[in-house]
Each structure stands twice: as C-alpha cells, then as structure tokens.
Amino acid sequence: MSALETIRSDLSGTTGTRFTVVLGDITRLSVDAIVNAANSSLLGGGGVDGAIHRAAGPDLVAECRMLKGCKIGQAKITKGYRLPARHVIHTVGPLWNGGANGEDELLAGCYSNSLGLAREHGLRTIAFPAISTGIYRFPATPAAGIATRIAVAESADGAFGEIIFCCFGDEMAGLYDRLLPEALAGA
Ligand code: AR6
C-alpha cells in the first residue's frame, strides 16, 4: 500500500480475519484479489471499472471477453495483469430502482459470491470497492451495511486473512468506520 492509501479502521473478527477500511484507489492495492464493480457485459465502463481496466492493461478485457458476461449479483474471476493485485473478481451490482426490486439481495449476492469465488481459489486478501454506490446510485448507508454484514458472515470459517473496504472518498470511509464495528459486534 502506498502513502496515498490511508488505513482508517483496522479490526479483527472472531476467526482472525482482519477487516480494514482504506481510503484510496483500489487499483493500487497489492492483494490476492480486488473486486470490480462491473456491468453485465464485463467489457469495461466508467467509475472503478474504468480505472481497473486502465491500470490492468488490454489483456484484461481480452480475458473478460471469453467470460461471456455475468449476471447481476454473480461474480467471475480473471488474472490481474499489470495491477499489483494478482486477480480481479468481477461482480455486477444492482442498479438502484427504489429498493423494492430485490436490490438488497442482489447486492448481498455480489459480496457473498465474490468471497465464495475467492475461497474456491484459495485467495486470502480481498479488497472491495463500495459496489453499486456510484453510477448505479445504491444509497451508501444501506450498501455499506450489507457489505460489512456479509463480509463478516462469510469470514466465519476463517478462510480469509484480510478483507479491505476500499473507499474513494472521506464520507464513504467514515460510514464504513462506523458500520464495521457494528457488523463485527453482530457476528
Ligand atoms: N478505487 C476505489 N473506489 C472507486 C474508484 C477507485 N479507483 N473509482 C470509483 N470508486 P462505480 P457502480 C468508487 O460508479 O455504482 C461502471 O460504468 C465510487 O466512488 O464505479 O457499481 C460499470 O461498468 C463508488 O463509491 O460503480 C457499471 O456500468 C464505488 O466505487 C457501473 O459503472 C462504485 O462506483 C457500475 O456502477
């Protein structure tokens, strides 16, 4: 991690998983996998997706093309290419449409399926952006609540060494700083 990425919270779960809130750019993190907030084509876009593809280089989209897309709430894995992260787990968040269209369950699926894939591949350090909270307009507070609760629940088997919530702004980092201890207390 460079000086540009600041660690905000650093807490441990009951099974020894470290949970950290980091303020900065996810493309700079040296972890086993970063998670991409992609769209169902998996062929790139704006926001964090655009940043990840730019930093990884053109081999990433070439591998993504072979995956034939991804459904909302599901996840697929590729190599990290020029990124410091070894892998990218691509997941597709729901577009916020009022909240009564299964958005919570679909977002929860993004976190549980991404971590399920990481577990299957033996990946122990995973960094997430705040999926769906940008272009897809999912409200930040419930989104961060889902992210932290699912990550804590999925780490109960001790499969993960560290789960990072990488926040792009101070406000989002503050939200995770507040919600992460609550999720750990509820575990
Ligand atoms: N590092 C960490 N977080 C980031 C970065 C970064 N480099 N850049 C943005 N964020 P968004 P979505 C934060 O819009 O809402 C794409 O076009 C950002 O501040 O990237 O899931 C896809 O192709 C926000 O908190 O993703 C889809 O079409 C969070 O990442 C669509 O956007 C997610 O914002 C997906 O929309």
Image (cartoon, rainbow, N blue to C red):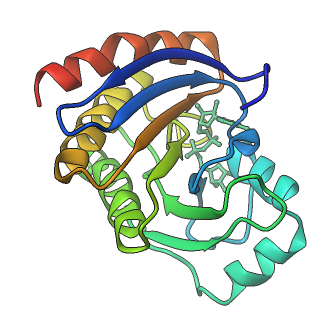
Q: Residue at x 10, y 24 (%)?
A: 186
Comparing 42 with 101, the one in front is 42
Examine the rendered structure and indicate whether residue 12 appears above or below residue 44: above
As drawn, the residue found furthest toward the front would be 16
Q: Which quarter of the rendered picture does the N terminus lie within?
A: top right
User: In the visual, does 70 lie left or right of 60?
Assistant: left
**Which residue is at 64% across, 18% downward?**
169
Ligand 1 shown in quarter? top right
* Tally of numbered tags: 0
Image location of residue 168, percent across then percent down? 65, 25
Which residue occupies the extreme left position in the image? 186
* x, y percent for residue 148: 31, 32
Picture coordinates of residue 145, whole percent (x, y): 29, 28
Q: Please identify the quadrant where the C terminus is shown.
A: top left
Q: Against 138, is 89 above or below?
A: below
Left or right for 62, reference 15: right
> In the image shown, does 53 or 160 lie closer to the viewer?
160
Of residue 146 and residue 117, the one placed in the foreground of this image is 117
Q: Is residue 75 left or right of residue 5?
A: left
Q: Could you tell me residue 159's position as x and y percent?
A: 29, 55
For image coordinates 14% across by 19% down, the residue present is 185
Along the viewing direction, whichever of 107 and 96 lies nearer the viewer: 107
Choose top left, top right, bottom left or bottom right for residue 6. top right
Dividing the picture into quadrants, the one containing residue 97 is top left
Tell me if residue 89 comes above or below residue 139 in the rendering.
below
Indicate whether 14 appears above or below 8.
below
Residue at 61% across, 11% down: 170
